[in-house]
Image (spheres, rainbow, N blue to C red):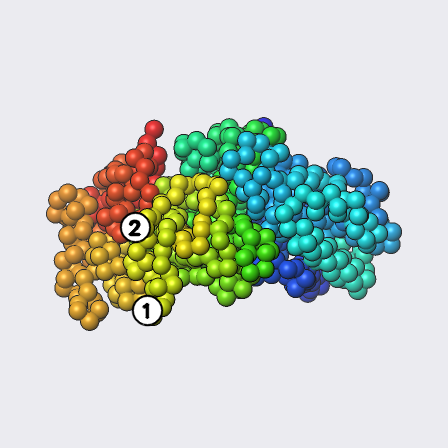
């Protein structure tokens, strides 16, 4: 059993001293500005589109004890891996053996906490007056890290030794400001893109050097004692805010399970279980009942677990705070050793962060939804949301260009364009990325076509993915490309969210799942020559292969088309309470099909696309009758979810309110008895079949079920949950 220590050391003498709030804010903002400048330095010196275009990295500053001073808002996954890497370095190399100009490289998921092996971390000690006063850390996804598969994702690996070159903490890559040549030669001899790889290592070092210079200038400006005092105060202030917000949540134990869709070798749903305990101002996440580690590449490293928990926690409890060690101060994370969320050597882990890690974030979001909705604090109640898709639909291609003879590896960042969960304030973001991707971007189509031998045929939102709700879940993206100046590529795919979709909140429905396919022998040039847009229904392929959730060793040839459809986010509130005008706009814009407007939202449109009000009233009444299996006893008078007002102590989902000693439907005021869940009418169905009725695509799996808890009086959806039978 491992308990991850996220709390800072005991309060120093800086806490409790009289202080100037202006100086505190200036130093706090200076630290944030430094990590942002480190990020700019990395992006401008890197030659990789994953760094320069997509921003798949992090930068951070730590104190000499390994506590986070500041962390850049790019990838929150790396919060945990950065901390574990630094603690591993401090264990491996005594601090008095470090010297100015040193830099240490690591990427091993097991010993350095890396989210996965391609996420390479470089740490630089910062010296002031001859002693270490802190560390600059940069981490980024590098395009190849050796191992059996180009790009570092290895579905068929049976252990971590086959996945990648493994660098533990303490490997010195720079000494006195110069590369350690023997280390450089050893590394580049084991990767497929040696020039690009080492240039990116240099960009990480440049980022750290920028951070070191700026931190030293800040210490000189304010004085070492003043700087230390106020940096301590900034950490303590963040800790105090998070602790106070936890204290506003009802004490208790809350449990839930998410499911990993196989491991690339065995087609099983693997449980990721969390027992969340709130005790005063302390929050404990216990993952001890999760699946044991598996033979496939989905095991989530210790560092990725911490980052995944922080990613799910921050929007609910720390949305307005600069991230430093204090944010994690009141949090405890426990995980069993040799489990899918804390694996031991030799478990493979090259895709654990984008699969199990994403599910951890979804699980934490779900559990916090269930407690923030019960808080007496209105602002915390408003933090509940639909679940984000939080799964990377990956496609990695490797081959040789015919025009230049250059070998390339394309890790397509478009795979991150999944939909976000809806919130009380609006629809979920379309093509948002994962919750962890705070400031990530996607390379322009033109940039990918410039750097790689591909031609995009389309890139658009996918109407079959946004979870129906009073606020619609964000849509995933549907795109396709074909090869240009390349005869064939070796292709690896993984699709973590196809069968168990992202759930909605407060009576909303889940989002759609992802899928990938290869359209064989397509006359793309003929379609273009005729002046037609190369849409899927015009391509006439010789055959279409719907790919499994994980495959490697695929061959895509010139004339084939690779298509990827990415999962969407869950909705917020009963879709029958959505503003009909918003549904009409969605149909007009291609975000919702006309059929789904009727089936999911109960909205009828006139020939000109405007809302037919009378027909809509009839459709919504009929939809409630279908849910109940009979005519509703009570007519619905609430026009939209905005009329629903949550109050402290409601202790239930969005559509339920306290009614004296019992519970009532907030939509029609119908009584639900002493236990709203027992008083509701529950309808169970196969998730894929029920969602297909609503225009949402999910890959069928019989044991994945949908439980709709309905008001027995009016048929309103009070709560809709994705479950797994057995």
Q: Position of residue 566 (x, y in %)?
A: 40, 52
Residue under the image location 58 percent in, 39 percent down: 148
Report how far apart the C-alphas of labels 2 and 1 lie in the structure: 33 Å
Disc on the earlier residue, 2 or 1: 1
* Dot 1: element: loop
Judging by the rendered image, the residue that carries numbered circle 1 is: 530
Give the position of the C terminus as an image quadrant: top left
Residue 625 seen in render: yes
Q: Position of residue 155 (x, y in %)?
A: 50, 38
Q: Position of residue 314 (x, y in %)?
A: 53, 50
Residue under the image location 32 percent in, 58 percent down: 539
Q: Is residue 352 left or right of residue 581?
A: right
Residue 377 seen in render: no
Give the position of the N terminus as an image quadrant: top right
Q: Pick whichever, 388 or 631, lies toward us.
A: 388
Judging by the rendered image, the residue that carries numbered circle 2 is: 696
């Amino acid at each position: 059993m491992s308990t991850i220590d996220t709390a800072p050391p005991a309060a120093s003498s800086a806490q409790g001293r009289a202080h100037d709030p202006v100086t505190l804010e200036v130093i706090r903002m200076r630290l944030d500005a430094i990590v942002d400048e480190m990020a700019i330095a990395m992006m401008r010196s890197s030659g990789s589109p994953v760094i320069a275009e997509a921003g798949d990295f992090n930068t951070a500053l730590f104190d000499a004890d390994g506590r986070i001073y500041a962390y850049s808002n790019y990838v929150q996954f790396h919060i945990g891996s950065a901390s574990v890497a630094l603690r591993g370095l401090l264990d491996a190399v005594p601090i008095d053996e470090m010297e100015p100009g040193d830099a240490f490289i690591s990427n091993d998921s097991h010993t350095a906490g890396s989210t996965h092996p391609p996420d390479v971390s470089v740490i630089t000690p910062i010296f002031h007056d001859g002693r270490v006063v802190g560390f600059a850390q940069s981490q980024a996804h590098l395009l190849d890290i050796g191992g059996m598969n180009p790009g570092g994702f290895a579905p068929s690996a049976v252990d971590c030794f086959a996945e990648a070159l493994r660098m533990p903490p303490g490997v010195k890559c720079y000494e006195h400001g110069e590369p350690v040549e023997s280390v450089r030669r050893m590394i580049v001899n084991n990767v497929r893109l040696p020039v690009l790889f080492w240039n990116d290592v240099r960009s990480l070092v440049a980022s750290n050097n920028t951070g070191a210079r700026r931190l030293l200038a800040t210490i000189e400006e304010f004085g070492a004692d003043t700087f230390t005092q106020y940096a301590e105060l900034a950490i303590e202030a963040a800790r105090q805010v998070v602790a106070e917000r936890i204290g506003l949540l009802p004490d208790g134990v809350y449990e839930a399970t998410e499911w990993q869709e196989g491991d690339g070798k065995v087609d099983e749903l693997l449980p990721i279980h969390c027992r969340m305990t709130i005790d005063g101002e302390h929050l404990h996440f216990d993952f001890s009942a999760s699946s044991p580690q598996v033979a496939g590449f989905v095991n989530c490293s210790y560092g990725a677990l911490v980052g995944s928990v922080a990613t799910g926690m921050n929007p609910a409890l720390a949305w307005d705070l600069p991230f430093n060690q204090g944010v994690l101060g009141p949090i405890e994370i426990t995980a069993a050793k040799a489990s899918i969320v804390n694996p031991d050597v030799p478990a493979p882990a090259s895709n654990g962060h984008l699969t199990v890690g994403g599910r951890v974030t979804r699980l934490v979001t779900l559990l916090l939804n269930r407690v923030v909705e019960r808080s007496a604090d209105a602002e915390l109640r408003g933090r509940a949301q639909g679940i984000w898709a939080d799964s990377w639909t990956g496609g990695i291609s490797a081959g040789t260009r015919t025009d230049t003879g250059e070998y390339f590896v394309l890790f397509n960042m478009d795979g991150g364009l999944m939909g976000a969960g809806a919130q009380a304030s609006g629809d979920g973001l379309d093509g948002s990325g994962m919750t962890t991707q705070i400031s990530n971007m996607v390379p322009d189509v033109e940039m990918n076509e410039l750097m790689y031998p591909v031609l995009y045929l389309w890139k658009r939102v996918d109407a079959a993915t946004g979870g129906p709700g009073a606020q619609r879940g964000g849509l995933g993206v549907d795109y396709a490309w074909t090869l240009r100046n390349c005869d064939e590529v070796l292709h690896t795919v993984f699709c973590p969210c196809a069968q168990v979709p992202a759930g909605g909140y407060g009576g909303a429905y889940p989002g759609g799942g992802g899928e990938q396919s290869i359209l064989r022998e397509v006359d793309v040039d003929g379609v273009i020559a005729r002046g037609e847009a190369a849409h899927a229904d015009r391509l006439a392929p010789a055959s279409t292969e719907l790919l499994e959730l994980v495959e490697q060793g695929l061959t895509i040839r010139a004339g084939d088309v690779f298509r990827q459809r990415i999962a969407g986010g869950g909705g917020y509130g009963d879709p029958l309470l959505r503003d009909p005008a918003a549904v009409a706009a969605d149909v007009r814009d291609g975000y919702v099909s006309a059929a789904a407007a009727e089936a999911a939202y109960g909205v009828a449109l006139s020939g000109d696309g405007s809302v037919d009000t009378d027909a809509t009233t009839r459709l919504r009444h009929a939809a409630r009758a279908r849910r109940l299996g009979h005519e509703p006893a009570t007519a619905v008078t609430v026009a939209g979810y905005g009329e629903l007002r949550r109050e402290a102590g409601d202790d239930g989902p969005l559509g339920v309110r306290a009614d004296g000693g019992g519970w009532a439907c907030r939509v029609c005021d119908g009584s639900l008895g002493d236990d709203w869940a027992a008083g509701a009418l529950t309808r169970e169905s196969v998730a894929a079949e029920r969602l297909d009725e609503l225009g949402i695509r999910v890959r069928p799996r019989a044991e994945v079920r949908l439980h709709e808890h309905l008001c027995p009086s009016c048929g309103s959806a009070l709560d809709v949950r994705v479950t797994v039978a057995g």
